[in-house]
Amino acid sequence: MLAPAAVTTDQRYAIPESMQAWVLGDPGQLMLKRKPVPVPNKAEVLIRIDAVAICATDLDNIYYGPPALIEGGLPFNKNWTPGHEYMGTVVALGPGVDEFAIGQRVACEIHAGCGQCKRCRQGMYTSCHNYGMNYGAHDKGHRANGFTTDGGFCEYQVNHINTLARIADDMPDEVGALVVTAGTAMYALTELGGLVAGESVAVIGLGPIGLLVAAVAKALGASPVIAADIADNRLEIARKLGADHVVNVRNIDAVEAVHKLNGGEGVDYAVECSAAPDAVNTAVHMVNRGGKVCLAAFLHEKVAVDIAHVVKNNIYLYGIRGEGKSSTHRAEALMRQKRFDAGLIHTHTFALEDLPTAISYAKNHTDNAIKVVVKARGVARIGVAAE
Amino acid sequence: MLAPAAVTTDQRYAIPESMQAWVLGDPGQLMLKRKPVPVPNKAEVLIRIDAVAICATDLDNIYYGPPALIEGGLPFNKNWTPGHEYMGTVVALGPGVDEFAIGQRVACEIHAGCGQCKRCRQGMYTSCHNYGMNYGAHDKGHRANGFTTDGGFCEYQVNHINTLARIADDMPDEVGALVVTAGTAMYALTELGGLVAGESVAVIGLGPIGLLVAAVAKALGASPVIAADIADNRLEIARKLGADHVVNVRNIDAVEAVHKLNGGEGVDYAVECSAAPDAVNTAVHMVNRGGKVCLAAFLHEKVAVDIAHVVKNNIYLYGIRGEGKSSTHRAEALMRQKRFDAGLIHTHTFALEDLPTAISYAKNHTDNAIKVVVKARGVARIGVAAE
Amino acid sequence: MLAPAAVTTDQRYAIPESMQAWVLGDPGQLMLKRKPVPVPNKAEVLIRIDAVAICATDLDNIYYGPPALIEGGLPFNKNWTPGHEYMGTVVALGPGVDEFAIGQRVACEIHAGCGQCKRCRQGMYTSCHNYGMNYGAHDKGHRANGFTTDGGFCEYQVNHINTLARIADDMPDEVGALVVTAGTAMYALTELGGLVAGESVAVIGLGPIGLLVAAVAKALGASPVIAADIADNRLEIARKLGADHVVNVRNIDAVEAVHKLNGGEGVDYAVECSAAPDAVNTAVHMVNRGGKVCLAAFLHEKVAVDIAHVVKNNIYLYGIRGEGKSSTHRAEALMRQKRFDAGLIHTHTFALEDLPTAISYAKNHTDNAIKVVVKARGVARIGVAAE
Amino acid sequence: MLAPAAVTTDQRYAIPESMQAWVLGDPGQLMLKRKPVPVPNKAEVLIRIDAVAICATDLDNIYYGPPALIEGGLPFNKNWTPGHEYMGTVVALGPGVDEFAIGQRVACEIHAGCGQCKRCRQGMYTSCHNYGMNYGAHDKGHRANGFTTDGGFCEYQVNHINTLARIADDMPDEVGALVVTAGTAMYALTELGGLVAGESVAVIGLGPIGLLVAAVAKALGASPVIAADIADNRLEIARKLGADHVVNVRNIDAVEAVHKLNGGEGVDYAVECSAAPDAVNTAVHMVNRGGKVCLAAFLHEKVAVDIAHVVKNNIYLYGIRGEGKSSTHRAEALMRQKRFDAGLIHTHTFALEDLPTAISYAKNHTDNAIKVVVKARGVARIGVAAE
């Protein structure tokens, strides 16, 4: 790292000038390269990345590009590094930063809002109106590492202090990498949804977000919490994380099952995490009059929605694209208190150099993979590097 | 009226034992009959109906039945009276009622919640979980006159006091019948939407609700207010009611126009009142990141929605089915202060006996009809009664 | 009970025509009498009272009369029965009630709003504008058993179904009687306060409400939770209920201690439950800029408040007088899930006939009494009845 | 101005290197000096100050110092310039600013939050936890011009773009200087208070904020709006601004009058702007059960408050210290639409050099002065400069 005087470092953490980093070539092509270690500016710190998880949207980003207009033709063949679910250790402080100390372990939110647009001024920084405006003369300060700026499939990254949540000393790296996923579940349920204890929740699709929606809902006192999926192993994990009831939708009708399990009534909240073709309607019909539906899955095509039912029943739908309103801090508070064991959804760890293998496991659910993590240190290589 | 001792009457208002009332036969068939004048119970009053407007949902109700499961096979051939947008004069008080006095003119909300379910206890009585449960042993007190109980195409009706909003002395009957329509617009924008002055609003479809959404938005200080429709006469009325800009979507792309008129950005709120096939997507693409879309139009089929755009942009959608949270009182407060002239959307008045003609005008937009009102008194018959 | 045909009973629960009931004579004087068992009307049930706890406000009510203007000179020498923290078993159903079944065990909220005033229509039934209007011609349906209508120091009472929360089968009666107290804590923190996991809370004064504020705050994921009192035994219970830190304010300055324990900053919420003379200011200075102060203790005199500090720091203060917004259901949901052991604050049980002894224990903290319960059945008399 | 390359200027606006500026000497002593024209950084612009109004808190600041701990001994004898209610013209843009153009007229909010603390991340930047932290190594970016950083009693000032609201072309400078005052009223009523049309409002104390509370409340559709003061000329202005009723509290009891004027009930909102000794209690007793009291006046001593009444009646109190949540934009939207004439409260204009005379008018209400404005250009000097 080229360390200007105003950057604070610490001899415990020697920072090299360059690092290993995966970069995106053509769609679907990842290459391991060397890049300079980035330098933190005002209100930023340098993070040594200790663990980075693979998210379904990483696969989208690697194949289709991330969902934002990015100046200059990013991401393909522009030396761009994907990866957005990472945690690490603060190893250098930008000028004036005293909110964090070198050596602290932190989870890293994805979105750093510009702080200047209407939504950021409302505290809705995930909906920043300058999303993706972070290059050259148009740099408004927005950052979404792994979406619009370099991400975490490398050794070091710079983060704005607003994106950081301290994690408990006894929280393993692999679990720390899931804090933002839990923060997304939290945001869906409380900050946006307004869930209070005793309300009923159904979740459709038990990927990592869906599983943590079940866990966070239960930790917040929701009752009953009903989880639906097609895979029995995932239903079993949902139950361990706190779901009161699980429904295998291969065998039975999800809407009917939810009504039956909730005393003959629709639930107060349904969270759609499956991206299945008719899942939006399933969710809409799962909730009661005045209920809320959170749409957390990215879809690639328009889907037919029973809008008449939405209108007649005063139903709310709201989309989320990740965490928000500092929900990550709240999720970490629950995890620190051991309200649920997020580690249950972590299934595999690979060396950073084995990212392609890791991605293959995540994509194909190899060996029942759910959350697959890569680490730059302390994990033996088992695969063969790409290139 | 069979007046038990506990009902308070007043000699100024002689109440007959029976009245004229339209009743629904087969789908699409209305018949003028005599019915007993109903009697108010505890917390209810008897309203002499002075004006009743025809709503698009009346047409739905008459042809398809209202959108609720009603015990006993209502509405067809069950002596049921439709009509839900009415105002009138309080002419008798149920036992213990002192909140209203005989002689007061009132607008009548549609929904009287049960007061006992979860939603009613939250103040969301329009989303009552006992909707339609108002017969026999299962009577939970819910009433939606003109949907699940007898409505306003007659001379007298009983209303729960919670459904009543006093109207200004100088407000004409025809305008008073629009207070609930304005209350629906208010509910969409403020109680559910959270609109504050200075935010931007687009409205799609300038039927009575759409026109009053434009009027109420402007009265609340929204800026800019953009109204879109295919009829120039309606765009002209929108402008008179307060729209800053109007867009004829026959000629230009609505989404593009709205962005251009709002300084290159999407608006904060879009209210879909058109029921046009792709209008939900039009609305979704009109709003900015974090924006809100209110769905106020009833549709009869599923429509394809760009859910990916909703998710990526943290957009909220919420359905409304009429007024709520006492929004009618707030709408009346604005109308009393002459913030807009709701009378601009009233185009025709017919005698109660001419209801079929009135419905024909409303359905076919005959003579540029927008809001068509029928009155039991003071209007000469011009048509020929149905059957 | 005089059981009209429309009241549903069950042979498992034989209901007598009269019952034992304590009634208030002169201020401070309680007498055990026989009263008729009351009869449930529409939307009401008859509760067999299985346990009733003594609250500090009971002492106020018995000595000063409850804080409401009640028509007809209530409460002194009017045959009025106090007692408002009770639970029991549903033993008869009023006409049309099918929301509850005979034999169900329930906790009973105090406040049944009129359902017709502005606040009730907003869901704020504890702030009912017809509070105390429940006699004769002015009966608007408001009930606050133990405050404005007969309460629970007797064998049976009638409750509106809106006041009932089902309790878990394995919840002891004595704990069930605390559900409403926990509901009050819940209302203070979430429905009114907006607390979300990870926020910091200080509570001043560890009576039953204060202790359950600490418990509920922790159960909701608040962090840190700091409890302050002058009694070490209560601080110890607070810790067992979930407080992260306890402060004995006899020895150290509460404001200073809270800042120190919260990383040098004021907390997000302070809940004042002590009624100590300067406690409002203590609470005001405990919170950070933009923080919230809940006032839960009844005071008998004006207190000097540092309003300048409130203004300069955008601080919110809000009073609560018990539960609200169905918070009791949410509290029960947490207790059912065993998030904290409310039984820790229950210290003594007496027979109903020994109420004066029970009150003396509660008033004088005899034998470190915290929550003292009386039961009409299953507890041997140890004292001597009044009269 | 020392203009670095990255600052954009325009030949229409020649910017001198130094300017006239009032600075604070000992308490109460103001001196006219020359200071360098400041230079805008990233996300900042340079404002040519066209009008600056005198606020009651200016007098407090000049005599007692502003209510914040400021490092380095500010404000006395530190060359500090007070003045915080100003508007002007954008004359230079800091690096990367394209949100505003040179030549635009803007009103300037006081508070620029740090953007990094908990409150700023919630959108509550007026409650910034780094308030006053804006010097040297501890500079967290918070600015409150005229409170913790140099203010507006001079010719030019630098403002963060988040503090700026464009004003209408036809809005006079003197009215533009009141936009932030109206924004404070807006914040009290809507963003914090949640006022919706049709709710009732009483305001106590008709200084500029109180008068604009009446105006904004009416513009938002509140009904009735009741204004109380001891000066008939101010009551008359309140009426012109929209108050439905005015009460001279010299002659009649304010609480009684408000209940009578509101149909026998307390109002939904009371806004205390008078700083009179018992005014907090007056406000508390003016509202109905569940009502809200906004405390907008700075007091210098503790006041006795009827907390028991607050608790028993579920009343909310909240302090404000100026605008917030972009309320200034919303206030400007109402003023642009001519919903009320804020110019009615502007009574006097002086030249910048005559600031001491202007302050004397404001302090002593000379010649019925309400809002007194000073301008650096276009106003003939009538007084003699201090020193």
Image (cartoon, coloured by chain):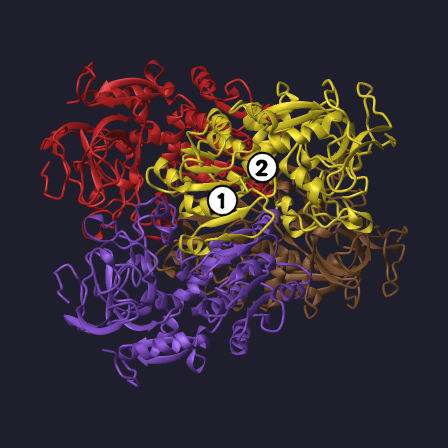
Chain colours: A brown, B red, C purple, D yellow
Question: Residue A221 location in percent, x, y?
Answer: 48, 63
Q: In this view, does D202 lie to the left or right of D371?
A: left
Q: Which of C307 and B96 is in front in this view?
A: C307
Q: Nearer the viewer, residue C378 or B258?
A: C378
Residue at point 29%, 62% (across, down): C145
Q: Can residue C171 be seen in this view?
A: no
- Quarter of the image for residue C27 reads bottom left
Subunit bearing disc 1: D
Question: Residue A146 location in percent, x, y?
Answer: 72, 49
Q: Name the residue under label 1.
A: D279
**Labels 1, 2: one chain:** yes
Asked if D77 appears above or below B283 in the picture, the reply is: below
Q: In this view, does B356 lie to the left or right of C304?
A: left
Q: In this view, does D129 lie to the left or right of B4?
A: right
Residue at point 43%, 62% (across, down): C184
Q: Is the residue under label 2 in contact with that under label 1 (CB below 8 Å)?
A: no
Question: Residue D148 location in percent, x, y?
Answer: 73, 43
What amino acid is found at the position of numbered circle 1 in the picture?
Answer: Ala
What amino acid is found at the position of numbered circle 2 in the picture?
Answer: Thr
Q: Mark 2 points at which residue?
A: D184
Q: Can residue C321 be seen in this view?
A: yes
Asked if D50 appears above or below B69 in the picture, the reply is: above
- Quarter of the image for residue B86 reads top left
Q: Nearer the viewer, residue B234 or B176?
A: B176
Residue at point 17%, 17% (across, down): B384
Q: Is mark 2 on a helix, strand or loop?
A: helix
- Mark 1 burial class by Cα count in 10 Å: few <14, some 14-19, many 20+: many
Q: Which of D50 and C156 is in front in this view?
A: D50
